[in-house]
Amino acid sequence: MNEKKVSEKLINDFLMEVESLLPSWLKIQDKKLNEILDELKEHIEDKV
């Protein structure tokens, strides 16, 4: 597996963990949840 795929998997695993820890009221708001996770992913990718 190349480094890019490894990084993507680690980031996605992390985002899934974050999502699992978010409050349920937020999880039912798909649009807001996706915005939060997308923004977090962008920040992580910028730093990587």
Image (spheres, grey):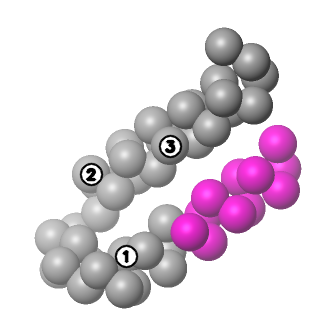
- Taking the spot 83% from the left edge, 56% from the top edge, the residue there is 46
Question: What is the three-letter code of the residue carrying label 3?
Answer: Asn
Disc 1 to disc 3, how far (Cα)? Answer: 15 Å
Q: Position of residue 27 (x, y in %)?
A: 23, 72
Q: Magenta residues, as a range? A: 38-48
Tell me the crowding category of disc 2: few under 14, some 14 to 19, or many 20 or more residues within 10 angstroms, Cα based: few
- Quadrant where the N terminus sits is top right
Question: What is the three-letter code of the residue carrying label 2?
Answer: Ser
- Taking the spot 29% from the left edge, 54% from the top edge, the residue there is 21
Residue behind mark 3: 12
Front residue of this view, candidates 31 and 36: 31
Q: Is residue 27 above or below residue 5?
A: below
Q: Residue 39 colored magenta?
A: yes
Tell me the crowding category of disc 1: few under 14, some 14 to 19, or many 20 or more residues within 10 angstroms, Cα based: some
- Name the side, left or right, on which 15 lies relative to 48: left
Front residue of this view, candidates 1 and 42: 1
Label 1 with label 3: CB-CB less than 8 Å = no
Residue behind mark 1: 33
Question: What is the three-letter code of the residue carrying label 1?
Answer: Leu
Disc 2 to disc 3, how far (Cα)? Answer: 12 Å
Residue 38, image quadrant = bottom right
Q: Earlier in the sequence, mark 1 or mark 3?
A: 3
Q: Which element type, helix, strand or loop, lies under badge 2? A: helix
Residue behind mark 2: 20
Q: Earlier in the sequence, mark 2 or mark 1?
A: 2
